């Protein structure tokens, strides 16, 4: 599926279209860099000093996804990159109900931070699914009033079975409830997830794996019709984060194969030494 943004935008006001066009580029694709992990994981490996790791990556990212504290404390305000702000949270990785999240940032605050979009997690299938789904619709109502797109993050929980049946269900629900972009996991038969979701789909990278595997996952997702990636650990925990984001870009924007992208990774790594 190719995301024709002018067509997708038929029902949208200028502000909404404009913000989405900052997040997803003219070719219908995007490299989003997720650095919001601290909101439930604290000082995640690679983000202990978020600015030190992430600022050098920003020239190669199309969009940054931080928390408000991450943004204010580590990212210079004169930087030219659209922000999709994490606006859900409320539980931690050591608590009993991981990802039983509610709204953590008001729309007024999101506007003050000049964001291009906001991100909210839903937990379809969890005992508390209703809370997260109603939280999403509250955020959608507020965000739509100001022309701000909501990106729904689906299925981050450990216990969820991440197959195409589940991910298609969760992604479609997110879109039906008003998300303008859906973030989910790659799985076998990913076409099914993309084809039954009426809004652009981006994939999370998940736990750090070797670079070749992460690049192959990104490639497979793009082949299946994903609009792009919203990747975190597989970029900022890489042995060479700048080289890795360049390689991911090659897949998302230049149709590189995993082998070609891995070459970009190796070359970029060498040229920095
Ligand atoms: C989790 O809820 C966060 O949104 C993460 O930022 C995310 O899932 C993407 O990061 P990663 O590629 O590290 O999985």
Image: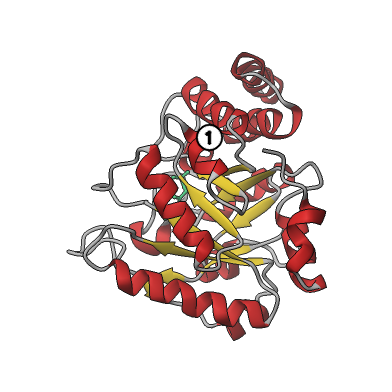
Relative vertical location of residue 244 with respect to residue 109 in this rendering, above or below: above
Query: Can you give x and y, in whole percent of width and height, for residue 41 in the image?
Result: 34, 57
Query: Can you give x and y, in whole percent of width and height, for residue 142 in the image?
Result: 57, 82
Query: Can you give x and y, in whole percent of width and height, for residue 63 in the image?
Result: 67, 53
Q: Nearer the viewer, residue 153 or 42?
A: 153
Residue at 79%, 55% in the rendered image: 7
Q: Nearer the viewer, residue 174 or 230?
A: 174
Relative vertical location of residue 3 with respect to residue 129 in this rendering, above or below: above
Q: Nearer the viewer, residue 188 or 269?
A: 188
Relative vertical location of residue 64 with respect to residue 177 in this rendering, above or below: above
Query: Can you give x and y, in whole percent of width and height, for residue 29 in the image?
Result: 71, 42
Residue at 42%, 29% in the rendered image: 188
Locate residue 11: give its quadrant: bottom right
Q: Which element carries disc 1, helix, strand or loop? A: helix
Locate residue 79: give its quadrant: bottom right
Residue 124 makes an appearance in the image: yes
Residue at 58%, 55% in the rendered image: 51
**Quadrant holding the C terminus:** top right
Work out which residue is located at the far left of the displayed protein and give it.
Answer: 96
Residue at 53%, 23% in the rendered image: 216
- Is residue 259 shown left or right of residue 8? left
- Is residue 155 shown left or right of residue 252? left
Residue position marked by numbered label 1 in the rendering = 191
Q: How is the image coloured?
A: secondary structure
Residue 90 makes an appearance in the image: no
**Quadrant holding the N terminus:** top right
């Amino acid at each position: 599926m190719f995301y024709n943004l002018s067509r997708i935008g038929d029902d949208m006001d200028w502000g909404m279209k404009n913000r989405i066009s900052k997040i997803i580029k003219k070719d219908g694709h995007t490299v989003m860099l997720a650095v919001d992990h601290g909101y439930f994981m604290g000082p995640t490996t690679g983000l202990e000093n978020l600015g030190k790791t992430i600022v050098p990556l920003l020239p190669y990212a199309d969009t940054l996804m931080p928390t408000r504290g991450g943004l204010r404390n580590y990212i210079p305000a004169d930087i030219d990159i659209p922000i999709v702000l994490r606006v859900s949270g409320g539980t931690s990785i050591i608590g009993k109900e991981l990802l039983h999240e509610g709204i953590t940032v008001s729309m007024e605050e999101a506007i003050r931070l000049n964001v291009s979009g906001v991100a909210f997690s839903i937990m379809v299938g969890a005992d508390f699914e209703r809370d997260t789904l109603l939280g999403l619709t509250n955020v959608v109502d507020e965000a739509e009033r100001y022309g701000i797109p909501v990106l729904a993050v689906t299925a981050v929980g450990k216990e969820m079975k991440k197959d195409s049946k589940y991910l298609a269900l969760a992604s479609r629900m997110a879109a039906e409830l008003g998300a303008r972009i859906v973030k989910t996991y790659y799985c076998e038969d990913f076409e099914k997830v993309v084809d039954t979701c009426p809004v652009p789909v981006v994939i999370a990278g998940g736990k750090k794996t070797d670079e070749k595997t992460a690049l192959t996952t990104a490639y497979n997702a793009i082949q299946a019709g994903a609009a792009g990636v919203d990747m975190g650990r597989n970029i900022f925990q890489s042995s060479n984060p700048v080289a890795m984001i360049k390689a991911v870009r090659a897949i998302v924007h230049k149709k590189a194969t995993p082998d070609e992208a891995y070459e970009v990774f190796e070359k970029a790594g060498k040229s920095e030494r």
